Image: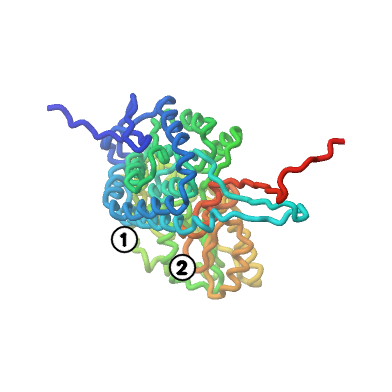
Amino acid sequence: MSAPTLPLIPNWISAAPAPTSRTNTLVHPNTLTPVHRVSASSSAELDAALSAAQVAFPGWAATPYSKRREVLLRAAALLRERADEFVKSWQSEMDVEEGFARFNVMTSAGMIEELAAGLGEALKGEVPQTNADGSSITLVTREPFGVCLALVPWNAALILSIRAIATPLAVGNTVVVRSSETVPGTHYLWGPLFADAGLPAGALNIVHTAREDTPKMTAELIADRRVRHVSFTGSSPVGRHIGRLAGENLKPSILELGGKSPMILLPDADVQTVANNILFHAWANAGQVCMSTERVLLPSSLAPTLSSALASLHSPNTPKIAKLFSPTLATRVRALVDDAVSRGAKVLVGSWPPAKESEGKAELPAVVLGGVTREMKIWEEETFGPVTVVVEVKDEGKKEEEVEQELVQWANDSHYGLAASIYTRDVGRALLVAKRLESGMVRINAGTIADEPSVAFGGWKDTGYGRFNGIEGLRAFTQTKAVLIPFNGAHLLPLH
C-alpha cells in the first residue's frame, strides 16, 4: 500500500492557487515528520507574482480609502472566524504553544482594525506656506509606492506577517509576500482570507522559495524594477544584507531586526511584581520574541530580594522545559549559556546543564543567570531563547543619581535598541530615565514585550530602521507628492 500523498501548499497569485513546477517537502523541525509539499518558486514563477501585483496596482490605488477600509474590516472579522484554521496550520508546521498562537490571531485582527481606523488621518494631505507671494498654492499628498515586497518571519508568524501585508494594502499599495520557509502554509492562509474579504485579484500575492534558493530569489525580487518598497523582519545579520540589496537598488525599506531588551529596577521598585514580570517576558514563546527581556539591571542591594522573589515563583524541582524552534537554535542558545557558566555565571532560576535526554532536541530548561560580565558572549549576543541575565550595579556608598546613571549606561551598552522597561514607584523619575535610554520603545512598570497597534513600533541602532503600526507605520508605506497651482495660470518668463 503506497503512502498517502502530502497536501500541497501552492503559491497564491491573482487570487488563486498557483502550483509551481518544483516542490519541496516541509518537515517539522522537531518531530521530523513530513507536513506538506510546498511550491519552490522559479524566477519565472516569481515574475508571475510581480506582474499580477503590478497590474492590480492602478485599480487598487484608485479605490477610495473608505472601500479599502471595508476590505480590511471584513478581513479582520474573517480572521476571528478562522482562528482555529490558522492555529492548527501553525502548530502543524512547528512547535508553538496554543495560547501564544491564539494571542497572535487576536492581536493580528486588532492590528487590521486599527490600520483601518487610522487611514483617514494617515493619508491627510497638507497645504504648506510657501514663498509664492500669494500667487499660487501647493498641495502635498501622500501616495502609495506601488508593489511592496514583504519578507516575513516564523516566530510570531501571524503578527509579524499581517503588519507587512495589511499596512501597505491599506494605503493603496499591492503586495508580494515571500513566506517563511518554516511556516509557508500558515502564511499562505492570508491569500484566501483577503480574497474572501473582497481584495481584488493581484493585490496580494504569496510566493514560497526552497531554503537553498531563498538568497538568490530574494535578491531577484529586491532588484526587480517593479518592486518599489521592501520590508523585512528577522535577524540583524540578514537584515544588513537585505538593507544593502535595497540600498543598491534604491528601494526604501523597513528593517525590524534583533533585540537585547533590558529591564531596569530603580531602588524603589516593587520587586515581587518585577520577579513575576521577568519570568513572563523572558520566557514567553521560549524567548523567541525580539522584545524578550534579555537583561535585568538592578542595584546590588535589591539582588537578594529579587533572588528570593524569583525562587518563590519557580520551584527548582520542576524546571520549565521550553520548546524551541529547532535543534540548531537550541544548540546555539546552549552554547551561549555554557560559555557564561564556564566563565563564572551562576544559575539563579532553573537547572543547568540540560538533561541528557534533551541532547539533540529543540528543548532547553528556561533559566535566569546571575554574575554575567561583559567578557561573556551572552552579554552582547541576542539569545532568542528562554534565558535572561541579572546584572548588578554596586550601590553601597553611592548617590542614587550615580547608581541611576550606571544603570542607564549598562542598559545602553548594546548594539541593539528595540525595547526597554523601567520599574519604580516614581513615574516622573522613570520618564527622565526613559529619555536617556537608546531604545525605540520604553515601558514603565510593564515588561518589554508589547505591540500596541496604534503606537509606532521599531528600534534604534542595530535593531534597524523604519516603523510599523499606527499613523507613522501607515505613512511609512507612502511617498509625498507636491503639486503647485498658480492662481493666474501659466505666464511668460523673461528669457534674457
State the SS at label 2.
helix
Q: Residues within 10 Å of mark 1 (few under 14, many from 20)?
A: few
Residue occupying the point 61% across, 62% down: 408
Residue 385 visible at all: no
Disc 1 vs disc 2: which is toward the camera? 2
Is the C terminus in the top left, top right, bottom left or bottom right quadrant?
A: top right
Q: Quadrant of residue 6?
A: top left
Residue type, label 2: Val
Residue 274: numbered disc:
2
- Measured from the top left, where is residue 374 in percent x and y? 58, 52
- Check the image and name the residue furthest to the left: 1
Residue 185 visible at all: yes
Residue 272: numbered disc:
none
- Measured from the top left, where is residue 299 in percent x and y? 56, 67
Q: Nearer the viewer, residue 415 or 137?
A: 137
State the SS at label 1.
loop
- Measured from the top left, where is residue 247 in percent x and y? 60, 36
Q: Residues within 10 Å of mark 2 (few under 14, many from 20)?
A: many
Residue type, label 1: Asn
Q: Quadrant of residue 249?
A: top right
Q: Earlier in the sequence, mark 1 or mark 2?
A: 2
Using the numbered discs, state the Cα–Cα distance from disc 1 to disc 2 in whole angstroms: 22 Å
- Measured from the top left, where is residue 303 in percent x and y? 50, 67
Q: Nearer the viewer, residue 335 or 41?
A: 41
Residue 317: numbered disc:
1
Is the N terminus in the top left, top right, bottom left or bottom right quadrant?
A: top left
Is 342 positioned to the left or the right of 210 in the image? Answer: right
